[in-house]
Amino acid sequence: MSIGIFDSGIGGLTVFKEVAENFPKADIYYLGDTARVPYGNKSKETIIRYSIECATYLYHNFNVDLLIIACNTASSYAIETLKKILPIPIIGVVKPGAEAAIRYTKNKKVGVIGTVATVKSQSYVNELKNLDNSLEIYQKPCPLFVPLVEEGWIDNEVARLTVKEYLQELIEKGIDTLILGCTHYPLLKNTIKSLYPHLNIVDSSIAIVDHIKNLNLTFNGNGVRKVFITDESHAFDNFKKMLIGDVKTEKIELSDLCSL
């Protein structure tokens, strides 16, 4: 069995890394839509269209048996549409992250950070409230986190100042658990933890592995690893090497993606 993973750019490589390590026999195909990154500032209609194009590309070209939407923005807006058009299990990052937060929190005060689009969608609020309506949930869009990660500025003074600027408001609300609602954000996890060591940090790239295991699927492939992008990206290459090593990257044309 094979797994397809897509994201708007490099953030989903954090999911690829965890899935590859936990399911070594699975054939895994990753698509980073680097030509159209970020999704977080796009309209709902555009996000859904891009997601359909990425998902159907992976399904039709590699016959994947499981699809992971490794993008919080796409998970927030497009997962229900994709479930209607593709006859395979589809996992987003929102539900696994919300379930992990429920397990972690002791005082029932949960913070959620993400792109403007993810926060606006209320996807985490709705999922968390469905699981426990007594939770206090505080959201904060952190639009500068993505360019920081893309630039590789994840553990310097600029990163620390930016983290404090965004998160201090949530800390003052008394949260004990923080959901990293963007797959870029785990690359800032160590910086966040160094500033706020008391926080339980929910990394969706880890939470999603537990979710896959609960599906009881058997992955007996050849351990194929393929990575595709829609445009050349120096930041993508750097983080690919850091996270998953020398897996070959192949560029596909947007015209191939959009013609499906």
Image: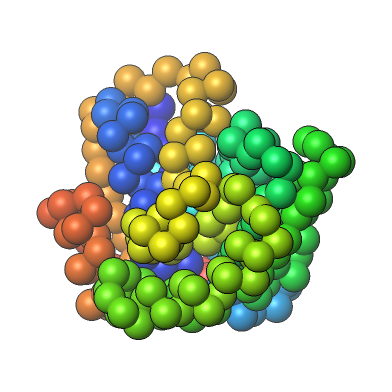
Q: Residue furthest left?
A: 246
Which residue does the image show at 52% across and 49% down from the upper left? 199
Residue 141 placement (x, y as % from top left)? 63, 73
Left or right: 133 with respect to 119?
A: right
Which residue does the image show at 25% across and 64% down from the upper left? 239
Left or right: 32 with respect to 245?
A: right
Residue 2 placement (x, y as % from top left)? 40, 33
- Which image quadrant: the C terminus? bottom right
In the rendered image, which quarter is residue 87 located in?
top right
Of residues 153 and 127, the one nearer the viewer is: 153
What colouring style does the render use? rainbow
Q: Residue furthest right?
A: 133
Which residue does the image show at 36% across and 58% down from the upper left? 194
- Which image quadrant: the N terminus? top left
Q: How many marks?
A: 0
Residue 226 placement (x, y as % from top left)? 27, 49
Of residues 5 and 169, the one nearer the viewer is: 169
Residue 152 placement (x, y as % from top left)? 27, 74
In the rendered image, which quarter is residue 83 located in?
top right
Left or right: 233 with respect to 195?
A: left
Of residues 129 and 54, the one nearer the viewer is: 129
Does residue 115 appear in the picture of this structure?
no
Does residue 198 appear in the picture of this structure?
yes
Q: Is residue 79 above or below residue 2?
A: below
Which residue does the image show at 53% across and 56% down from the upper left? 180
